[in-house]
Amino acid sequence: MALRTRTSAARSVMSLVLSCAGAVHLFFPLLFSALQPAFGYEYASLDSPALTVEHFGVPGLNNDGVVGIIAPQCKKNCNFRGLCSDGVCYCQPGFSGNSCDRETVSKRGNYALNEVGMVSLGVFLVVFMLTFSCLQYQEYSKKATERAMGYAV
């Protein structure tokens, strides 16, 4: 194990790396040249142990492995919206079809366009009539006040 440091900050970083290295096998020499401006040390390297499949959580080698792309059992691989089992797609909630290609549309909370149009027209007419009535009343009051003041209106 080779290790060269210059500052105490670098030593604390390296002690952290070395304590982690005890639990996690490092398979290549680590070079910390990117941290040199911050911590002021040249490099640090750890000697790596021999690689085995156990280091990767694999209990053994697969001698019957296949190289290349494996064709999916289901059409379009269920569009990544379901699980394929024996050539049948079992779709996620909200999707349907032989290959989970149709999204189920929820009608909850939706309104028909003609209903929205009728309500909008009704509100517009009520507001228009109220505005027209207020303007007519204001004009009538104005004329009545002018007549009371003696103007010929």
Image (spheres, grey):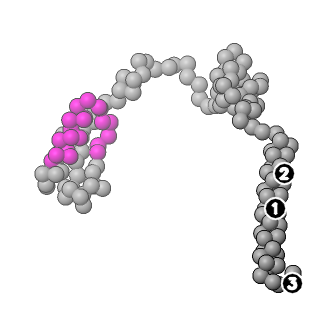
Q: Is residue 138 above or below residue 85?
A: below
- Give the mark toward the camera: 1 or 3: 3
Q: Mark 1 = which residue? A: 133
In the rendered structure, the answer to whether residue 146 lies left or right of residue 26 reads right
Cα separation, mark 2 vs mark 3, equals: 41 Å
Image-quadrant location for residue 45: top left
Q: Residue placed at 12% from the left, 51% from the top?
A: 8
Image-quadrant location for residue 85: top right
Cα separation, mark 1 vs mark 2, equals: 18 Å
Amino acid type, label 3: Ala
- Give the mark toward the camera: 2 or 3: 3
Which quarter of the rendering shows the C terminus?
bottom right
Cα separation, mark 1 vs mark 3, equals: 24 Å
Q: Which mark is residue 121?
A: 2
Amino acid type, label 1: Ser
Q: Position of residue 118 (x, y in %)?
A: 85, 46
Which stretch appears magenta?
A: 11-30
Considering the whole magenta stretch, tell me its main secondary structure: helix
- Disc 1 is placed on an element classified as helix
